[in-house]
Image: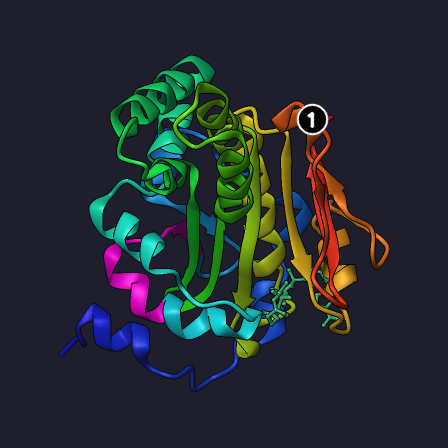
Amino acid sequence: MGRSSRARRRDPIRHPIPAARTVAATKNSWKPDLTEAGLAGGWPFGDGFLIRPAAVGDLDAIAELVPEAGVKLENEVRTAVEEGTLGAGLRASLRGGKDEFLRHMAETFFAHQGTGRFDQALLHTGLVLVAEHEQHGIVAALIAHPPTHMLSDLAQHAGPQTRSGRDLVLAGAIGMARIRAVVVREQVRRHGVGAAMVRLCRLIYAAAGFFIVYGQMPPRPGLDLFYRSCGLLVQPPGTGLDAWVVTGFNTNIQPGADERIFIWRKP
Ligand SMILES: CC(C)(COP(=O)(O)OP(=O)(O)OC[C@H]1O[C@@H](n2cnc3c(N)ncnc32)[C@H](O)[C@@H]1OP(=O)(O)O)[C@@H](O)C(=O)NCCC(=O)NCCS
């Protein structure tokens, strides 16, 4: 008898996937189809992996994985996945291009006007991806969304109910995304899955016209090589990020102690 998908997902991986089976047809040759159909069906990768947006049934597996990247699955992100609002703006972008994306985001912000809950509107450009293996279930997760805390700090400063406060949050929601976590189960590392997820994330945000995709990495061996292999710039320790291109004025985002910022900027 087949097991339930929930049981299958939560099973530990018993057999590491042999390198020879997965290395072909991966990495450089991978060209994900960036359409709404691609988004709905997921993107096959390598031998037996499918990279796709997270569904409600994946949330427990994601919550188990992401602490290895030093973060937890935030309640707001969980709720947005459950309600189907997470990434709704990015889906609009893949469906109808930039115009449909901007229309969706303008309507979303209008609907949240006066509620003070712009964090919910921001998650319309959130992205949670999982990689599922046909035998081993969920083996990797990536979480990205606009930098909610930074944007709400800026909005507080400008006055959250003022036009400039709202404009700032909207500009952030359609212009910059932070990769909060990317984690691949140890048994399937070095098969290109992590880099494929980061690349896909970058392509999805680029398609929506974002200016910046960035994150912060701890001083762990190999992480700088990993992010460089994904086409991101890894900044020297202590170097901040100026998001003026999004906010319209100089904003010095500093990495945490010992951390480094990795970044992709729209060419
Ligand atoms: C970082 C992580 C996501 C990488 O995932 P992955 O699927 O193993 O990475 P990939 O196979 O896509 O690696 C692509 C390239 O990155 C580089 N790379 C990845 N891991 C590396 C390591 N440990 N040491 C050196 N280089 C590494 C290599 O150049 C690799 O290409 P290669 O295998 O052809 O040499 C994974 O190691 C992980 O989950 N680590 C724990 C969580 C974590 O630290 N997340 C990041 C927090 S900011």
Dot 1 amino acid type: Phe
Task: Establish if 107 lies above or below 146.
Answer: above
Residue beneath label 1, please?
249
Instruction: Mark yes or no: residue 33 visible.
Output: yes
Task: Establish if 34 lies above or below 49.
Answer: above
Which residue is pictured at 27% across the width and 75% down the height? 8
Which residue is pictured at 73% across the width and 73% down the height? 220
The image position of residue 77, as x and y in percent, is 35, 53
The image position of residue 7, as x and y in percent, is 23, 77
Q: Is residue 82 left or right of residue 169?
A: left
The image position of residue 21, as x and y in percent, is 56, 68
Classify the position of ligand 1 by quadrant: top left, top right, bottom left or bottom right.
bottom right
> Farthest residue in the bottom direction?
14
Span shown in magenta: 50-61
Q: Residue 133: within the magenta? A: no
Task: Establish if 126 lies above or below 196.
Answer: above
Q: Quadrant of residue 56?
A: bottom left
| Most foreground residue, 15 or 225 | 225
Which residue is pictured at 44% across the width and 68% down the height? 72
Q: Residues within 10 Å of mark 1 (few under 14, many from 20)?
A: few
Instruction: Mark yes or no: residue 137 visible.
Output: no
> Farthest residue in the right direction?
236
Q: Quadrant of the C terminus?
A: top right
